[in-house]
Image: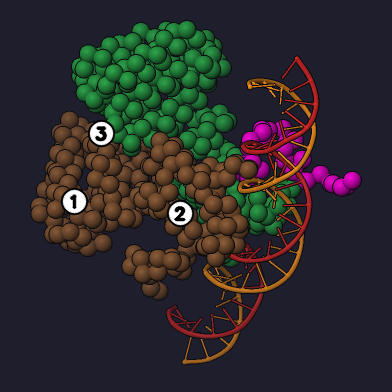
Chain colours: A brown, B green, C red, D orange
Amino acid sequence: MKNRIVKEADIAKAPEDARGPGRRLHGAIAHRLGTDILSGKYAPGDILSGEIAFSEELQVSRSAYREAIQVLTAKGLVASRPKAGTRVLPRDRWNLLDPEVLGWAFAGEPDIEFVRNLFELRAIVEPAAARRAAARRDKADLKAMKDALVAMRRHTLTTEAGRAADRDFHNAILHATRNDALMVLSASIGAAVNWTTQFKQRTRALPRNPIPDHARVYDAIAAGDGDAAAQAMNQLVELALEDTRSAMDA
Amino acid sequence: MKNRIVKEADIAKAPEDARGPGRRLHGAIAHRLGTDILSGKYAPGDILSGEIAFSEELQVSRSAYREAIQVLTAKGLVASRPKAGTRVLPRDRWNLLDPEVLGWAFAGEPDIEFVRNLFELRAIVEPAAARRAAARRDKADLKAMKDALVAMRRHTLTTEAGRAADRDFHNAILHATRNDALMVLSASIGAAVNWTTQFKQRTRALPRNPIPDHARVYDAIAAGDGDAAAQAMNQLVELALEDTRSAMDA
DNA sequence: CCTCCTTATTACTCCGACATATTATGAGCG
DNA sequence: CGCTCATAATATGTCGGAGTAATAAGGAGG
């Protein structure tokens, strides 16, 4: 049984009705409106045309449009009130750490400043997570990290399998912290990192081999050395930011 | 002249839900289902009854029920597929940092372990934020912090106004970091902290005056001393955790 | 035992009507 | 002239039903 994945090219090919199999209509509408908002096409304070007008313009029923709006409302992007209409909320109300919102943010040309902020957050959270992982990890955690490391060596970051292994490695570390809140944050940051990594690949080949950095983090966690793990992870993040920044400047 | 039968009265009058004004019906349904999921009434893997059955049981239309499901889907709590039904997703897919989800998590008796994890995250993020705020704050930031500090002194944490001032203080610090991602995280953590603070008050009077701790953080940020700001904030969080833990143990 | 096809079930989409909440308007009055 | 309060206008909210499409499950054929 072939488990086909939906390629990015498919939805990019049909910008108007970006609706592939498995993707619901209201999901597609939410995706379109979400990217439009994140890209600045609709600015905070703007009021969307009424339900009837907009749903007709999009050629969809009012129900589908409303369900899409509920999704955006749940993510803090918009708010609706009778008679007043649906307006885009100020940016600080947006749920920027929502994985789907992050995907929308990176759908177009990503804002360099926002990427910098995400890496700053990553530089705060991941070293601290690595320190705790070094103290709490068990054999299963170490095995998951080592497997991911091996997979990264095999496929390199130029392939989707390699990037998946990279995410697995970081997820294994976060999992070893035994902290739900940290793990959820990892899902968000991991998604963002994935987008930026993909972006790096889009411009040119990765200038540096990231495997040794990951190996250092693994060794420190395996040795139970929290300080070394935090330091190694901090270095990893800093270098990743450097790579991404140079790729975006070019 | 219209002889209307009880339509949405049942849900509205339902004791626990208390659908307040300004709160929509689908929002109330999402709130109810959300709290039921967070409280464990519906466990991950459980399949909800079909749209028709459940909407009739709740005495609401399918539209309202569906829009509520879209909200839960957007927050990663459930996923729906034709023929398979709507099932509760595993916990690691939940958007636990979504402010609304956090509210649902604290609607019932909060899980002590989850609270500990949230404070651990706070202990990671807020000191780092304070360090950066010390480096980047301007006069407006300092004024906002000082105003919040004054308001905290006036009202104390026993009043809603005082707790709002507490949130304002922390938000001012996060705002001074000039980092969107950090600010969003602050909204989440702030919401959670608000719930726990409220919980502390519910059990007994606050055993210690938190104002001096906040003042120390302010002084360090005003002086531009990043290390001192981080250390003071770390101490503040640790003490807050201690208070909350003792309040919950009792 | 596996593959392919059929079928039944379930969510998904659409439609049109009515109810409700909020803003805007303007009449009446101090 | 400016304020208050009732009234009307309008967009969102809620409803019920009909029909479509997708998918898991079970059966036919290899």
**First along the sequence among labels 2 and 1:** 2
Q: Nearer the viewer, mark 3 or mark 2?
A: 2
Percent x, y of residue B162: 49, 14
Q: Secondary structure at mark 1?
A: helix
Q: Is residue B59 visible?
A: yes
| Residue type, mark 3 in image | Ile
Q: Which residue is under mark 1?
A: A248
Percent x, y of residue B116: 41, 27
Q: Which residue is under mark 2?
A: A33
| Residue type, mark 2 in image | Leu
Horizontal relation, residue A157 to residue A207: left or right: right
The answer to the question of whether label 1 and label 3 lie on touching residues, with beta carbons closer than 8 A, is: no
Q: Identify the residue at horizontal 63%, vertical 43% (top origin).
A: A83
Q: Identify the residue at horizontal 48%, vertical 18% (top origin).
A: B163
Magenta stretch: residue B123 in it?
no
| Residue type, mark 1 in image | Met
In the image, B210 versus B67, the foreground residue is B67
Kindly report the distance in space between the C-alpha atoms of the residues bearing marks 1 and 3: 22 Å
Horizontal relation, residue D5 to residue B107: left or right: right
User: Looking at the magenta stretch, what is its main secondary structure?
Assistant: loop
Q: Secondary structure at mark 2?
A: helix
Kindly report the distance in space between the C-alpha atoms of the residues bearing marks 2 and 1: 26 Å
State whether residue A250 is above or below residue B138: below
Number of the label disc, if any, that sits on residue A124 = 3
**First along the sequence among labels 3 and 2:** 2
In the image, C15 versus A236, the foreground residue is C15
Q: Identify the residue at horizontal 41%, vertical 9% (top origin).
A: B150
- Over which residues does the magenta segment extend? B1-30
